[in-house]
Image (tube, rainbow, N blue to C red):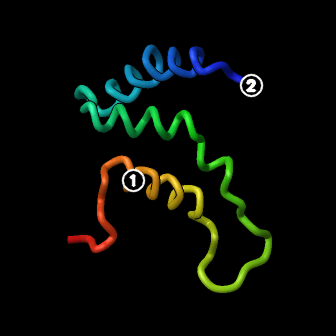
Amino acid sequence: MRKLSQIWFEVQEVLFPFIEKQVEEPLTKKLKQLVTTLELIRIENMVRVPEYWQGQSPKYRKQIARAFVAKAVYNMDTKGN
């Protein structure tokens, strides 16, 4: 298991610079908060994708879970105004 200090170092010294290089601009404070939150909680590891299901395909459940975290970090309402 990784220590919090190790995760924080990786986020600050590796992940932020990598993302900034990819998008070619500095990350906002809120976006850094989102990246840090997603990296710390790793919600995609908690999402179960069943072998059998009814209805909508569970193909994108992990991405949807991450989107819900982003929604919470950005304090977005569910009405979509």
Q: What amino acid type should be assigned to the residue bearing mark 1?
A: Ala
Q: Indicate whether 71 appears above or below 21.
A: below
Q: Judge left or right: residue 71 versus residue 30.
A: right
Q: Judge left or right: residue 72 versus residue 48.
A: left
Q: Which residue is mark 1?
A: 72
- Any mark on residue 1, and which? 2
Q: Position of residue 27 (x, y in %)?
A: 27, 30
Q: Indicate whether 25 appears above or below 6.
A: below
* Outermost residue toward the left in this view: 81
- Any mark on residue 8, and which? none
* Outermost residue toward the right in this view: 51
Q: Secondary structure at mark 2?
A: loop
Q: Secondary structure at mark 1?
A: helix
Q: Position of residue 51 (x, y in %)?
A: 79, 70
Say which residue appears at 33% left-offset and 24% top-offset: 21
Along the viewing direction, whichever of 20 and 10 lies nearer the viewer: 10
Say which residue appears at 47% left-offset and 18% top-offset: 14
Q: Name the N-terminal-most of marks 1 and 2.
A: 2
Q: Indicate whether 58 appears above or below 28.
A: below
Total numbered labels: 2
